[in-house]
Amino acid sequence: MPRSSGLTRAAEVSARVSVVILSMRFLLCPVWKISSTPSDPSHAVAEGVAEALVQVAAQASEVSYFGHGTTVATNALIQHRGALTGLITSDGFRDLLEIGRQKRPDLYDLQADKPPALVERRLRREVPERLMHDGRVETPLDKAAVRDAVRVLRNAGVKAVAICFLYSFLDTAHEEAVLRIVGEEFPEAFVCPSHEVAPEFREYERLSTTVVNAYLGPVMAFYIRGVAERLTALGVTATPYLTQSNGGVIGFDAAARLPVRTVLSGPSTGVVGAQVTARLCRSI
């Protein structure tokens, strides 16, 4: 098979199969599949890379770009296999996660079953604090209450903590204070404040997005760390990237910090791949 000075490797990891595509300059190699490894999806990624290099008799150091899409976050969310998550929120707002908005599948069905919330009610802790719509502080943050809430969550065995205060996108001071306290009281927890995940208007959307990010955090951190370590062990020196839900790519560090961006990573990779393929076909 013709050789090239640079190899570009792409992969898509799903629940059942991992798809590998290896492209070389002026040449697109065949696509093949290997069985995924659900207990540790990163193993299949490494296996696919190793097999790709054997297929073209290349060295790992020749890989110039590594990008991949994955449904690890998608599957964890759909199957409710994320981490046990706690929530710290403004006093009086812990039920917002279940109330949501008026848009429902059946507006007038009082017996309709709702999907279970990603954070159990007992793990949603309220603390006194309040920002007004203009960012003015009406009620200062009760830091003693925050410490009590963090200790309750730690003792409950949560692995991740979401922080979301009313209008915190206008002034991040309260959420930043909670972030510091969690770091002191519960340093091993995956923690994410809403102003870093979705700093925008609409409380339910910001809250739910932050909760999903926390829920997926430990799962994706384990996966991303595994992929990075296995690629390094193979000798791949190219900076790895992961596809976002919008079809773009982000580095592994950003993906581990903001895993909510990868919820549609696998499907979006398919769309982008189909678009590129279509362009190549038109140019033939």
Image (spheres, helix red, strand yellow):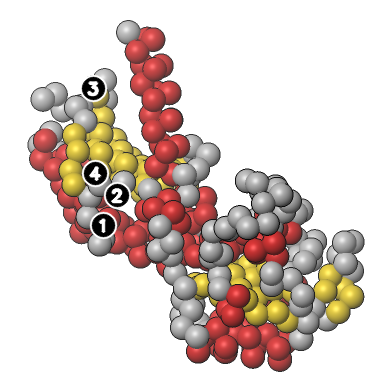
* Occupied quadrant, residue 279: top left
Tell me the quadrant of the picture where the N terminus can be found.
top left
Question: Is residue 122 shown to the viewer in this render?
Answer: yes
The residue mark sitting in front, 3 or 1, is 1
Describe residue 207's horizontal placement relative to residue 119 as left or right: right
Q: Circle 4 is placed at which residue position?
A: 17
Numbered disc 3: secondary structure = strand
Q: Gap between marks 1 and 2, in whole Å?
A: 6 Å
Q: Circle 1 is placed at which residue position?
A: 38
The residue depicted at 50 percent of the width and 89 percent of the height is 155
Describe residue 97's horizontal placement relative to residue 225 as left or right: right
Q: Amino acid at mark 4?
A: Val
The residue depicted at 48 percent of the width and 79 percent of the height is 158
Q: Circle 2 is placed at which residue position?
A: 15
Q: Gap between marks 3 and 4, in whole Å?
A: 24 Å
| Residue 224 rendering spot, x and y as whole percentages | 36, 58
* Occupied quadrant, residue 66: top left
| Residue 140 rendering spot, x and y as whole percentages | 83, 81
Q: Amino acid at mark 3?
A: Leu
Q: Gap between marks 4 and 1, in whole Å?
A: 10 Å
- Crowding at dot 1, Cα within 10 Å, few <14 / some 14-19 / many 20+, comes out as some
* Occupied quadrant, residue 282: top left
Numbered disc 1: secondary structure = loop
Describe residue 132's horizontal placement relative to residue 204 as left or right: right
- Crowding at dot 4, Cα within 10 Å, few <14 / some 14-19 / many 20+, comes out as some
Numbered disc 2: secondary structure = loop
Numbered disc 4: secondary structure = strand
Q: Circle 3 is placed at which residue position?
A: 27
Q: Are marks 3 and 4 in contact (CB under 8 Å)?
A: no
